[in-house]
Amino acid sequence: MSGSEVKKLQKPDIEAIFARSPFINFMNLEVLRVDHDKSEFAVRMPLRPEYERREGTQQFHGGAIAALIDVVGDFAIGMMVGGGVPTMNLRIDYLRPGVGAFLEGVAVVRKTGRTSAVIDIDIFSEDRKLVAIGRGTYVPITG
């Protein structure tokens, strides 16, 4: 291969990117898993008062869940191509309220092509209930 081969991102690389992004840094995401062999990426997002649907309920707002889905999907392909990538399309199905101290997002790359990649994202509550599912289409080129 040529010297322009893409460097796959590891956990410290992704953590550094998260720290440099004002929005993602605000989300306070913890990288749980970077698995290139399984094309899987997982993070945990703690509840912040700004994410609550109603104060004191520990119920995540749908917008915070949508942001989590997009970031997890983005970096599932981004870990393979060397950085964050543009989102082409995002679909979300909310299945139940996300309640608890954190949500966990797990993304699996289903198909990668030259111009697009399809990623499935599952969001789990603290008690491991499936809260939402997302499917994102991303451009597999950093930028």
Image (cartoon, grey):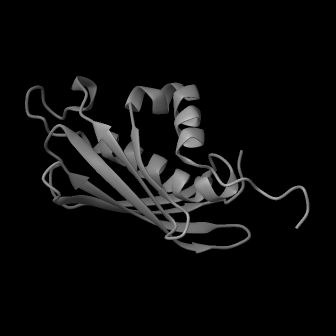
Seen from the viewer's position, the closer of residues 35 and 52 is: 35
Q: Is residue 136 above or below residue 102?
A: below
Is 135 left, or right, of 19 in this rendering?
left
Using the rendered view, name the quadrant where residue 52 is placed.
Answer: top left
> Which residue corresponds to the image point at 74% horizontal and 70% vertical from the top-left?
114
Residue 117 in the image, given as x and y percentages of width and height: 60, 67
Is 139 left, or right, of 51 in this rendering?
right
Residue 97 in the image, given as x and y percentages of width and height: 15, 50
Image quadrant containing the N terminus: bottom right
Seen from the viewer's position, the closer of residues 79 and 94 is: 79
User: Number of numbered discs present?
Assistant: 0
Is 17 left, or right, of 105 in this rendering?
right
Is 57 left, or right, of 14 in this rendering?
left
Q: Is residue 51 above or below residue 142?
A: above
Residue 94 in the image, given as x and y percentages of width and height: 25, 58
Residue reaching furthest left? 57
Image quadrant containing the C terminus: top right
> Which residue corresponds to the image point at 67% horizontal and 60% vertical from the top-left?
140
Residue reaching furthest right? 2
Residue 86 in the image, given as x and y percentages of width and height: 63, 50
> Which residue corresponds to the image point at 49% horizontal and 66% vertical from the top-left?
119
Answer whether residue 123 is visible to the viewer in this image.
yes
Answer whether residue 93 is visible to the viewer in this image.
no
